[in-house]
Amino acid sequence: MSEEENNIIEITDDEGNSINCELYDIIEYEGKQYAILVEADIAEDEAEMVLMRYLEEDGESIFETIEDDDEFEKVSQYIETLEADENEE
């Protein structure tokens, strides 16, 4: 599903299209790790963020789609609170 090279991750969207994303950050929420990715080949003001579950197995990085809508929403809200905290500082 993904390929990592110098922080560029190739992911496949729901329609089967390949998208190059840059690894922006990895966060931990409720004991799991999540990767925040930003589309790499698009102007910065038009690039979308992509949120995926992040795992490491046998030294390899694995990026998984978050299928559970509730999990996705909770992690998204957590990221928003982190961003708000950073903006206040």
Image: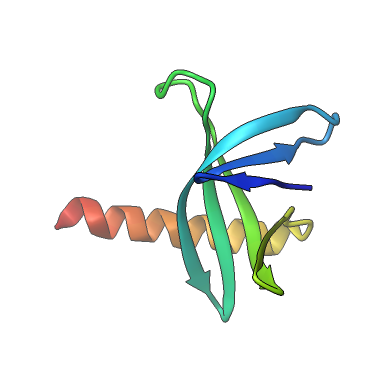
Taking 21 as reference, is 52 above or below it?
A: below
Q: Is residue 6 left or right of residue 52?
A: left
Res 84 → quadrant: bottom left
Q: Number of labelled discs?
A: 0
Residue at screen point 79% across, 47% down: 1
Q: Is 40 on the left or on the right of 12, as rendered?
A: left
In the rendered image, the vertical position of residue 6 relative to residue 63, given as above or below: above
- In the displayed image of the protein, which residue is found farthest to the left? 89
The furthest residue to the bottom: 31
Q: Is residue 43 above or below residue 78?
A: above
The residue closer to the viewer here, 47 or 23, is 23
**Residue sitting at x 52%, y 29%:** 40
Q: Position of residue 6 (x, y in %)?
A: 50, 44
From the top left corner, tell me how far across and down residue 82 is, in percent. 35, 60
Residue 30: quadrant of the picture: bottom right
Residue 73 located left or right of residue 64: left
- Residue at image location 85% in from the left, 29% down from the top: 15
> Whole-percent x and y of residue 23?
50, 47
Q: How is the image coloured?
A: rainbow
Question: In terms of depth relative to the viewer, which is nearer, 8 or 42?
Answer: 8
Residue 27 image offset from top left, x and y in percent: 47, 65
